[in-house]
Amino acid sequence: MLEQSTWIMTLLVMARTFAFLSTLPVLRGIKIPLSGKLAITLPISIFIAHQIEIVEVETVLEFLGLLSFEVVVGLTLGFILELITSIVRMAGSLIDQDIGLANPFFDPNFNAQSTTVSRIYFYVFLLVFIVLGGIQKVIEGYSYTFQLTARTTFYGEQTFLDFLLDTIDFMFVGAVQIAIPFMMSTFLVYIALLMMSKTVDKINLLMNIFGIKIAVGMVMIFISIPVLIMAFEQVFESFFDTFLDLIGTMFER
């Protein structure tokens, strides 16, 4: 009976863990096959299942209900964290639109359309995340959730809805704050080109503006890499602050 209960707990933990890792944006940015995700999920689940209190499950219907709830919890944790990392990709998309590189292409890692600068930004953030030990901190924080009890009605609670709205608001504001220096630089380029076109009649503004915008944008990205790394470190800190706040919203002792 004890062995059966242990395997039931392992399956429940595995359901939450697999759902969490499948939506975790940091791992989605790395092309990991399904077998690789299962290989990561299984040892983590077995380790956590032996550390937590066993829940008695009497019927198959009760087990399926618990399994579905664990999947929902895992997907919610991963989705909220994806909103935070979307700051980086959204800022890149704003810059792409401003400097003329907004032509999207399919990104197989996210199964969605992406742009050039947004993808560059995400991989720079991913590098910062790994160097600062983000994966270890995510696993530690995620393991801590099993020491708490998930609220069964957290989706309908006002605190969770307020937290979700605040996270979405923070995502948009953070993206604009990162992209605004590039947008201001291209705006100044527009003003300079307009003044030159008024003083030098032979300059064909429409023929040259697109190339100049892209060149200025690439130079700005190269120059601002040290500042971007500092900004991404702040996103990294916000990532875990939000993670801890999310745990406090969804779980209780």
Image: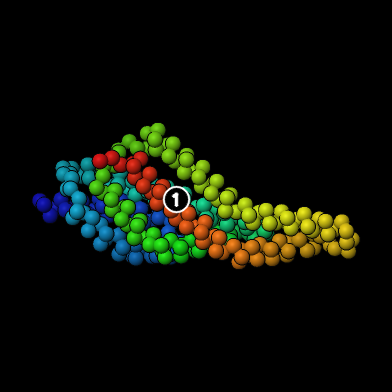
The residue that appears at 38% across and 65% down in the rendered structure is: 33
> How far across and down, in percent of the image, does residue 37 sit?
34, 62
Identified at 35% across, 53% down, the residue is 20
Front residue of 167 and 210:
167
- Asked if residue 106 shows in the view, the reply is no
Q: Position of residue 183 (x, y in %)?
A: 66, 54
Give residue 69's quadrant in the image.
top left
Dot 1: element: helix
Q: Amino acid at mark 1?
A: Ser
Residue at far left of view = 1
Classify residue 114 by image quadrant. bottom right
**39 in relation to 81, above or below:** below
State which quarter of the image contains the C terminus.
Answer: top left
Q: Is residue 147 visible?
A: yes
Residue drawn at 32 percent across, 52 percent down: 141
Residue 127 horizontal side relative to residue 199, left or right: left
Q: Seen in the image, is 65 located left or right of residue 180? A: left
User: What residue is shown with label 1?
Assistant: 238
Residue at the far right: name it: 201
The image position of residue 4, as x and y in percent, is: 14, 53
Q: Nearer the viewer, residue 129 or 96?
A: 129
- What percent of the width, then of the height, locates residue 133? 38, 62
Eyeballing the image, is 75 above or below 113? above
Direction from residue 53 to residue 189 in the image, left or right: right
Residue at screen point 63% across, 54% down? 181
Tell me if mark 1 has few (under 14), some (14-19) or many (20+) residues whose alpha carbon lies within 10 angstroms of its own: some
